Image (spheres, rainbow, N blue to C red):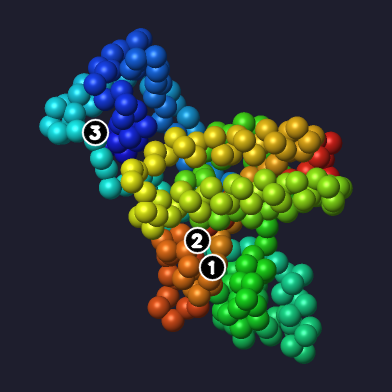
Amino acid sequence: MICWSQLDLADEEEQGVEITLNGDSWRRGEARYVWELHVLKPGTFVPSLHIHRLDAEDVQRLLRRYRTAKHHSSGPLRHHEVNKHIEYLSGPAETCRVDMDRLAQVAQGAGVTLAQLISDLGGEVEAGELQRFGFVMSLAQRYSPSNPNRFIAGPMPHEMSRADDDTLLRALLPRVDTVRFRFASNISQEDRQDVRDAMNELLESLQMRKMSQAGALSLEHSTPQLVYASDGESLRLHLQERGLVMYAAVLPHLFRIKDLEAQLGAIPIPVEDISPFAFGHALFLHVETEQGGL
């Protein structure tokens, strides 16, 4: 139903044109549609993406169901969900990798050992960098309330997925709440500024998408997801023109509640009623030259 409602929303001018079968695809006017099943499975930093294209028999069965749904509808199909719910991207994982170097700096500044600091905040010393997420919340609240994500360790490039096309980005962008990025050390200052500008454009588009989905924008008509579908590919091609590549991952991300007051519906999943933070996920991108770099 989500796919069908998006199809009708994006194709409102073609509502009077019948959809027909064309082998293993649908055709409406000049447009041809193929159907794929994309399955995201949890990973430490990068979900694995499995893609299965529906064959002619499945596509025919799907069209019969679509026609039945249209028969019982008085107009374009609508569905309250915009993106299919994915459980593991809907709340914090049980554990999170902590930046131990920054944690050691905090311990040194507090005049205690690293083990004492971890124990004091309810962490497990023997767990090392892989701590329960509640420990990260306590750490951020006490030592970095203005930048709660500074203790969440980012993955190394080999733990991420190189974006040689936009397939993974297209699957992830509707399901994350913000975008973070870092540069390899060999990226020039000119390239850094250019990439920052491109990343800000991606983030602004993502915020518009989130606010539109939450009904926080006064729009005469609903906006189909197709409007944002090329965001990831536009960024990838822009980097490619500069001889740059990017690696993608997903990280937990904490938002200060007071920072969200002006972003209605942008990202709200409160972790606890008493917490100053809301929880979400960030698309984390590592940018380096085609030749590599750290």
Provide the residue designation for mark 3.
Answer: 76
Residue 21, by quadrant, is: top left
**Residue 70 picture location, percent across and down:** 18, 29
Extreme residue in the top direction: 23
In the image, what residue type sits under mark 2?
A: Gly
Which residue position holds label 1? 255
Q: Which mark is residue 280?
A: 2
Report the residue at 73% width, 46% height from top: 195
Front-lying residue, 157 or 194: 194
> Looking at the image, which residue is at 56% across and 39% down?
231
Q: Regarding mark 2 in the picture, which secondary structure is present there?
A: strand
Tell me which numbered mark, 2 or 3, is placed earlier along the sequence: 3
Residue visible at 19% across and 33% down in the picture: 75
The spot of residue 153 in percent (x, y) is 67, 62
Q: CA distance from mark 2 to mark 3?
A: 32 Å
- As drawn, 209 above or below 54: below
Amino acid type, residue under disc 1 in the picture? Phe
Residue type indicated by callout 3: Pro
Q: Earlier in the sequence, mark 2 or mark 1?
A: 1
2 and 1 marks in contact (CB < 8 Å) = yes
Q: Secondary structure at mark 3?
A: loop
Figure check: 59 above or below 90? above
Instruction: Find residue 276 and report its horizontal and vertical position in percent.
Output: 50, 78
Q: Nearer the viewer, residue 99 or 229?
A: 229
Q: Earlier in the sequence, mark 3 or mark 1?
A: 3
